[in-house]
Image (cartoon, grey):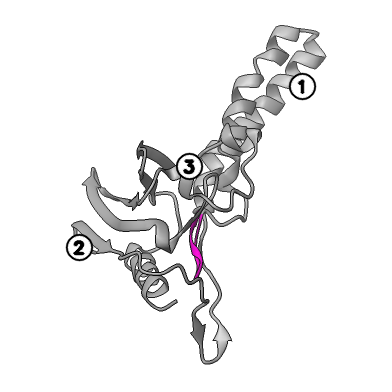
Amino acid sequence: MRLGAMRVFFEGTGTSRVSSTVSGALRPPFRVYFDYRLAGLWIHLPGMVAFFLIITGFFAGDAGVMLSSLLPMGIAFYHQPLVREMPQIEVSAEGLFVDGLGLICWDDIIAVELEEMPIGSRLHAELHIETADTIEAVLEDQRGLTFARSLQLMIWRLDDMNELTVKLDRLRVHTDDLMAEIRHRRFHR
């Protein structure tokens, strides 16, 4: 992998939403999931600690010990998306879907930039997306966005009214594959 930034500019010409095809068949969406190997520390360990505190508090008759289980249960709840088999990013003919945010159509995306930074012994990658209008105005499909989901781990953050950063560190994807798919979907719709 190379370091630095790769920037892909999109020209918003037309509003066609024609699906791309491969050998006459519809090309399935490119989906990116969490790396479930990270779940052990953040879900299983706090879950076991919470279970231990509840059982200990119940048999000791101490409500304070049982209430102290709320912290590890909250940590496990926050990190619960790590074990869900739901795509965090979905690249399709319609646009770019980010879990917990929604679908941004290709015509609304001005630029996508991949930034890779070495931090310690790891290579951290972020996808920067710039839209023509505010993020709230360009979102089309907000499936799965509930109050409970808004309290959980998200891979994105709003940098500005029309700029979005998606963290790729916890996902099972090679950044080159993701950028190639984004370029292909945008220019071959």
What residue sits 28% from the left and 56% below the top? 114
Q: Are marks 3 and 1 in contact (CB under 8 Å)?
A: no
Q: In the picture, which quadrant includes the C terminus?
A: bottom left
Q: Which of the numbered marks, if any, corresponds to residue 55?
A: 1
Q: Is residue 114 left or right of residue 27?
A: left
Tag in front: 3 or 2? 3
Identify the amino acid type marked 3: Glu
Residue furthest to the bottom: 23
Q: Position of residue 141 (x, y in %)?
A: 58, 53
Q: Is residue 92 magenta?
A: yes
Instruction: Measure how far apart labels 3 and 1 are at the Cα level.
Output: 45 Å
Instruction: Measure how far apart labels 1 and 2 are at the Cα level.
Output: 51 Å
Identify the amino acid type marked 2: Arg
**Could you say which is closer to the camera, residue 129 or residue 37?**
129
Q: Which of the numbered marks, if any, corresponds to residue 136?
A: 3
What residue sits 47% from the left and 45% below the top? 137
Where on the picture, by quarter, is residue 172? bottom left
What residue sits 65% from the left and 20% below the top? 70
Residue receiving disc 2: 2
Instruction: Measure how far apart labels 3 and 2 are at the Cα level.
Output: 33 Å
Magenta range: 89-97
Identify the amino acid type marked 1: Ile
How packed mark 3 is, by other alpha carbons closer than 10 Å (few <14, some 14-19, many 20 or more), is: few
Tag in front: 1 or 2? 2
